[in-house]
Image (tube, grey):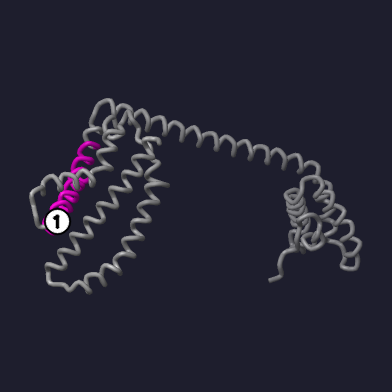
Amino acid sequence: MSVRRLLKRMHLASMTWFMLCVGYIVVRALHEAGFKWWLIFTLSGHSALVVFLLVSLYLFALFRGVGSTQYIAQEHPLTSTHYYMGLYVAAPLLGGLAGVLGMLGVTDPGRFLVGVALGTLGTTFIVWVVVDPVAGLVEMLLPESRKHRAERLARIEAERRARHERRERLLAEAFAREAQQQQQWQERLQPHAERLATLLTIDVTSLPKAEKEAVDIGATAWRLGGLTCMRQLRDMAIEISKRSRSEVRPVDYVSYWWDGIGDWRRPSLG
């Protein structure tokens, strides 16, 4: 069995013991305050579900989330050791043992159990709330820890900048390729765009013949560069038509003529 798995199981046992001690102290305090046993157990029954949900979330974090977090030994020379982690997770059990030793000779079972429970809570509080933060603070102030942390953060920042620069370079290359491709299409599509612009200005009676020719031009553009190429050709034709007939806004027949060519779809009338 690995040390980490052993620590997790020890932590589970410690938390179970810790919650039992807390529950016992709460129940005994309510009883000594004058509450009836039936009321105490009724309240405990409702609280048990909440405690169960909280414990389930805690165990999920322990075994799937927080428990898998690795301490950096160079920055945490004390708290990353197995000895310290063993002390940390076993604090409730050690507190219970200290409570048993401290209550030796007490004949009253109730007082004995209260002493054991209080020993558990006191030791757990000291280790988890006092000792652990102080130990972590001391580790952060050590020169070697501060140096390693600064180097690690600088390395992370350098990697982040390198990834950002790589993304920017890839985007710039993609935009450059797209611009170059559009320039190549511009030269090849110019005659087709001029012809489409002419078809947009023909008489209404000639629209069926114009549509057939426009479909052939659209199919050529689709084979050349797909939907992007078709859009560029359509925009070029509209622009040429606007320049040649500045006083009349051209009707965009192309968007309807090309419906069904490749991925081209006519605009929605709604």
Judge the density around disc 1: few (<14), some (14-19), many (≥20) Cα neighbours within 10 Å: some
Rendered image quadrant of residue 8: top left
Q: In what quadrant of the picture does the N terminus appear?
A: top left
Q: Is residue 193 above or below residue 38?
A: above
**Mark 1 element type:** helix
Q: Which residue is mark 1?
A: 114
Q: Is 93 or 252 nearer to us in this picture?
A: 93
The image shows residue 167 at horizontal and vertical percentages of 55, 37
Residue at horizontal 17%, vertical 74%?
Answer: 36
Q: Reply yes or no: does residue 92 show up in magenta.
A: no
Q: In the rendered view, does 22 fall on the left or right side of 262?
A: left
The image shows residue 132 at horizontal and vertical percentages of 23, 40
Q: Is 255 or 196 nearer to us in this picture?
A: 255
Rendered image quadrant of residue 268: bottom right
Q: Reply yes or no: does residue 124 show up in magenta.
A: yes
Q: Is 38 or 33 nearer to us in this picture?
A: 38
The image shows residue 110 at horizontal and vertical percentages of 13, 59
Q: In the rendered view, does 80 fall on the left or right side of 38?
A: right
Residue at horizontal 74%, vertical 57%?
Answer: 242
Magenta stretch: dominant secondary structure? helix
Q: In what quadrant of the picture does the C terminus appear?
A: bottom right
Q: In the rendered view, does 207 fall on the left or right side of 89?
A: right
The image shows residue 79 at horizontal and vertical percentages of 28, 35
Q: Of the residues shown, which amino acid type is indicated by label 1?
A: Val
Segment tinted magenta in the rendering: 110-136
Q: Is 220 or 236 nearer to us in this picture?
A: 220
